[in-house]
Amino acid sequence: MTYETDGKTMYLAEQIDELKAQGLFNTIRTIESAMDGRIIVDGHEVLNFCANNYLGLANHPRLKEAAKKAIDQYGIGPGAVRTIAGTMSLHKQLEQRLAEFKHAEAVITLQSGFTANLATIPALVGKGDVIFSDALNHASIIDGCRLSRATIVGYEHNNTDDLRRKIAETTEYGRRLIVSDGVFSMDGDIAPLPELYEIAKAHDILLMVDDAHGEGVLGRGGRGIVDHFDLHGKVDIEVGTMSKAFGVVGGIVAGKQVIIDWIRQRGRPFLFSSAMTVPDAAACLEAVEILEESDELVERLWSNAALFKREMTALGFDIGHSATPIVPVMLGEASLAQQFSKKLFENGVFAMAIGFPTVAKGKARIRVMNTAAHSQSDIEQALTAFESVGKELGVIGS
């Protein structure tokens, strides 16, 4: 593409050209079908190993039916922010059911997991306070920390010894907060939440975990990382999302009643942005019902992931240290990752390259997202494509 530019925008065209030269320009593909294990992308039917649709609920007939019924009863959207005229009975039902599901005192829902972090962190800490943040935390946590105006002290990824050192070295503070992802989305590893809890308890520091990729994946029936480690009532704030395993969209903040009540008073995305739409809230409610009824989808997800990991390792791929269904296929250079993704697509597999700034330079990869929507034959077909492309590009031996 050639851009028409003037003096005010020339630098943008130059930076885009630089991204393309470095293999970092993100070409966004278009999906032309319902989200599922097999989808139509740019006119081609392909196996979908890109989406966060862990349990295959994004196209589940029960969720679609719940959304349709809710539209007939309540319309499309609330038409206001929650604090003025946007709180509908569906929102209250969803928050109550999520609190029961997660064994939390209370839950507040927001428009997305991203806005949940933007609402929560600045509401809890501010100028003069200190946040201890894992080095690989998600961008939404980073942005929430910046907006708070608190001092941000990073600690080495999942390194609790380094966290202890940083706490000991940080002597000037008002309030303090430790924040970490639960499941790290690019590597698939899990935060050492029990150790983080012990550190937070010993130093009387608020503890917050963002469980976006643990919701519907970890814990009994997908109840998340707090349930996984049996830390109910001990982790102060658990942020999550309904846009991944739940198959819909929306953010969750679960925790102590006093914290949730305060976010209702001071969480800016809650106060100043319109509420979740009616069909979204209704579909999320139905997703909770499905997860409470059976853990079949969660078990299928983990079974598919185990098969894929085992066979990819046998083929000779470097898949990092994932402890979840997220499988990073480590390739190094962004240009190689983009070429690998293009070749996979030609072989019927949709799995996008991930490069800087999402991951560090030199750490480009294909991030494979296994789901319960895949059959065993889907997994085997994907493995065949990875083997073929891996040999063609010299990533694995012939």
Image: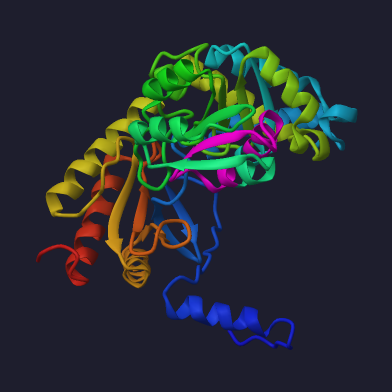
From where the camera sits, is residue 222 visible? no
Q: Position of residue 186 (x, y in %)?
A: 40, 48
Kindly give the residue lying farthest to the right in the view shown: 84
Depth check, front residue: 281 or 43: 281
Instruction: Residue 222: name its quadrant.
Output: top left
Q: Quadrant of residue 336?
A: bottom left
Looking at the picture, tell me which residue is in the foreground, 347 or 22: 22
- Is residue 78 part of the magenta span, yes or no? no
Is 41 displayed left or right of 97 in the figure? left
Q: Please report the residue visible at 79 percent of the width from the left and 19 percent of the height from the top.
A: 89
Query: Is 98 rendered above or below residue 170?
Result: above
Q: Is 96 drawn above or below residue 285 in the view shown?
A: above
Query: Which quarter of the image is occupied by the N terminus?
Result: bottom right
Residue 137 within the magenta-colored segment of the rendering: yes
Q: Is residue 93 above or below residue 323?
A: above
Specify whether 352 is left or right of 146.
left
- In the foreground, 15 or 372: 15
Above or below for 178 versus 257: below
In the image, taking residue 29 as reference, residue 333 lies left or right, namely: left
* Segment tinted magenta in the rendering: 117-142
* Quadrant of image for the C terminus: bottom left
Measuring 57% from the left and 45% from the top, which residue is drawn there? 142
Return the x and y of residue 112 as percentages of the image width and height. 64, 39
Measured as percent of width and height from the top left, residue 271 is found at: 81, 34
Q: Residue at x 23, y 43 (%)?
A: 309
Work out whether residue 255 can be spotted. yes
Which residue: 64% across, 39% down? 150
